[in-house]
Image (cartoon, grey):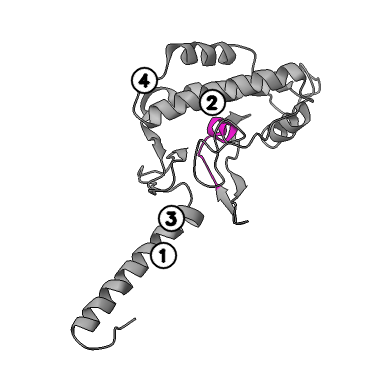
Amino acid sequence: MDQNGETVSTGQDFRSREGVTWLFDSGSTALDFCYTGAWGAADGHLDETVEQLDTPAALSAWLNTRIPCSPATDRDLQDAQALRSTIARIARALADEYPPAGTDIDMLNLYAATPDVPARLAGGARQAGRTEPRAAQVLASIARDAVALFSGRLAGRLRHCAADDCDLVYFDSSRAGTRRWCSMQRCGNRDKVRRHRARLAERTQLALAGNRLPTL
């Protein structure tokens, strides 16, 4: 998602049940939004959700990490949770290579059609519009980010993590389109450890068969 010509940073830290903190970059602000409660992430399972946006203040805090905005209201919170669930259902359908439900498409388009955060050129002498956008405008910008993500060729880069015990969804923004893991810190590193242990076990078996010690 871009704001005033600059890309809004993506990614957020999660903490597993074992107390390990790891960075998961979904590749999209809209997908990051899903991981605040529509999806789980800490332990690699989408269905193990923990609601992070349970109050307007919590919503405001999260939105302000992306685009500074005025405090959210109870209505903003309701809209945020509805929009978030809609984006999550569409993204999961596309990652699973299924067509999303028409009702979800209609809902997303409805939010995307509302006023979003306007572009603003710095350096002028007069203030045009609000000093800072409303939370509802930031939600509209997130909806438009989702529309762009789900449209055309970008939708083909919505993927699940390749690990057998992880089903997190991300947008592969790599140049070659070869991203496999939700995070190299987590599943990528685990795969390296498993492959190293497998090679070591194979060498050990060969060494035992040849009645000699393995070379590490």
Task: Tell me how far mark 1 sits from mark 4, CA to CA.
Answer: 36 Å
Q: Which residue is mark 1?
A: 193
Task: Locate residue 80: give its quadrant.
Answer: top right
Q: Is residue 26 left or right of residue 5?
A: left
User: Label 1 amino acid?
Assistant: Val
User: Label 2 amino acid?
Assistant: Asp
Task: Tell me how far mark 4 sits from mark 2, CA to CA.
Answer: 19 Å
Magenta extent: 24-34
Question: Mark 1 or mark 2, which has the lower sequence index?
Answer: 2
Task: Tell me how far mark 3 sits from mark 1, CA to CA.
Answer: 9 Å
Question: Mark 2 or mark 3, which has the lower sequence index?
Answer: 2
Q: Position of residue 110 (x, y in %)?
A: 56, 11
Q: Is residue 194 magenta?
A: no
Q: Is residue 80 left or right of residue 34?
A: right
Q: Circle 3 sits in a helix, a strand or a loop, which is it?
A: helix
Q: Position of residue 50 (x, y in %)?
A: 62, 37
Labels 1 & 4 near each other (Cβ < 8 A): no
Q: Which residue is mark 2?
A: 145
Q: Viewer-proximal residue, 201 or 56?
A: 201
